[in-house]
Image: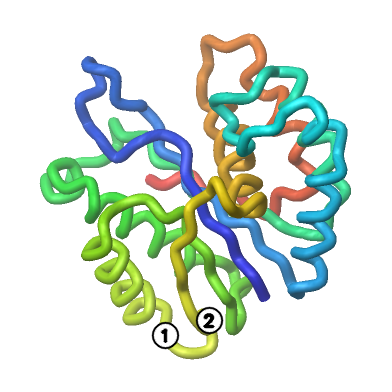
């Protein structure tokens, strides 16, 4: 099993100064490495790739590229599970003050409450953050998740991995659906719906 994780939004709480009101983390789950390789090949050969040569990042893609991308991946062999955090519901001073702990807490929650989906998974997480943070997150996930759920965890720059980019696109599509003032808020989440296993709204 292969799992790729990325997020949309940030861990900041200065909402009046531009921090995102919603944080979304998503994991893309492949049962086999063959399914992952097949999906990667499909994305690289897609019309979306012909129109967009840089890495796929939801917030940097045109509407047309997003349409082409999700039209392609909705047929691919993976599932998406995501956690949605509305920041106004967070009261923990520690989570509000420490961005690393915020990120760690919600990535752990998403992976812990996976409805049994994760089994001996090889996990790839977008490689943001410094080395110490990555080491701490790796250790925290292993302590919390226990044996049989995760085989190993590594961090990888999304620029070099189209499946981490897929996780970014999925997180972005779900996050957009929580922007009530946008007329297109449900456009790409609806396109992704065949691949969505669960979207958990943290309360």
> Marks 2 and 1, how far apart in space?
6 Å
**Residue 32: percent from left, percent from top:** 76, 74
| Residue 58, position as x, y percentages in the image | 59, 31
Q: Is residue 27 left or right of residue 22?
A: right
Residue 126 appears in the figure: yes
Instruction: Please tell me which residue is depicted at 56% across the width and 25% down the height of the picture.
Output: 60
Mark yes or no: residue 199 visible. no
How many C-alpha atoms fall within 10 Å of the one at disc 2: few (<14), some, or many (≥20)? some
Which residue occupies 22% across, 46% down? 99
| Residue at image location 64% in from the left, 70% down from the top | 2
Q: Residue 146, which numbered label? A: 1
Dot 1: element: loop
Q: Which colour scheme is used?
A: rainbow
Q: In this view, does 99 lie to the left or right of 33?
A: left
Q: In which quarter of the image is the C terminus?
A: top left
Residue 113 x %, y %: 49, 66
Q: Residues within 10 Å of mark 1 (few under 14, many from 20)?
A: few
Query: Observer-nearest residue: 87 or 9?
Result: 9
Label 1 near label 2: C-beta < 8 Å?
yes
Residue nearer the viewer, 12 or 46? 46
Which is nearer the eye, 199 or 65?
65
Query: Could you say which quadrant of the image residue 169 lies in?
Result: top right
Please give the label number shown on residue 149.
Answer: 2
Secondary structure, mark 2, is loop
Q: In this view, does 165 lie above or below 141?
A: above
Question: In this rendering, is residue 95 above or below 3?
Answer: above
- Locate the N terminus by quadrant: bottom right
In this rendering, is residue 97 above or below 164? Answer: above
Spot occupied by residue 68 in the image (x, y as percentages of width and height): 82, 29
Residue at image position (65%, 54%) is 163
């Amino acid at each position: 099993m292969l799992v790729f994780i990325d997020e949309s939004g940030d861990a900041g709480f200065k909402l009046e100064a531009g921090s995102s009101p919603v944080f979304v983390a998503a994991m893309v789950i492949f049962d086999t490495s063959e399914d992952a390789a097949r999906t990667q090949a499909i994305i690289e050969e897609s019309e979306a790739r012909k129109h967009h040569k840089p890495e796929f990042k939801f917030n940097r893609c045109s509407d047309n590229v997003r349409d082409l991308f999700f039209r392609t991946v909705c047929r691919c062999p993976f599932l998406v599970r995501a956690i949605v955090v509305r920041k106004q519901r967070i009261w923990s001073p520690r989570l509000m003050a420490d961005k690393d702990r915020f990120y760690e807490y919600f990535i752990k929650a998403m992976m812990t409450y996976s409805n049994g989906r994760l089994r001996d998974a090889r996990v790839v997480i977008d490689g943001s953050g410094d080395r110490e943070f990555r080491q701490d997150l790796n250790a925290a996930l292993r302590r919390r998740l226990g044996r049989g759920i995760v085989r190993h965890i590594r961090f990888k720059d999304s620029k070099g991995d189209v499946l981490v980019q897929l996780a970014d696109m999925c997180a972005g599509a779900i996050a957009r659906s929580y922007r009530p003032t946008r007329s297109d808020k449900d456009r790409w989440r609806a396109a992704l719906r065949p691949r969505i296993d669960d979207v958990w709204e943290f309360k």
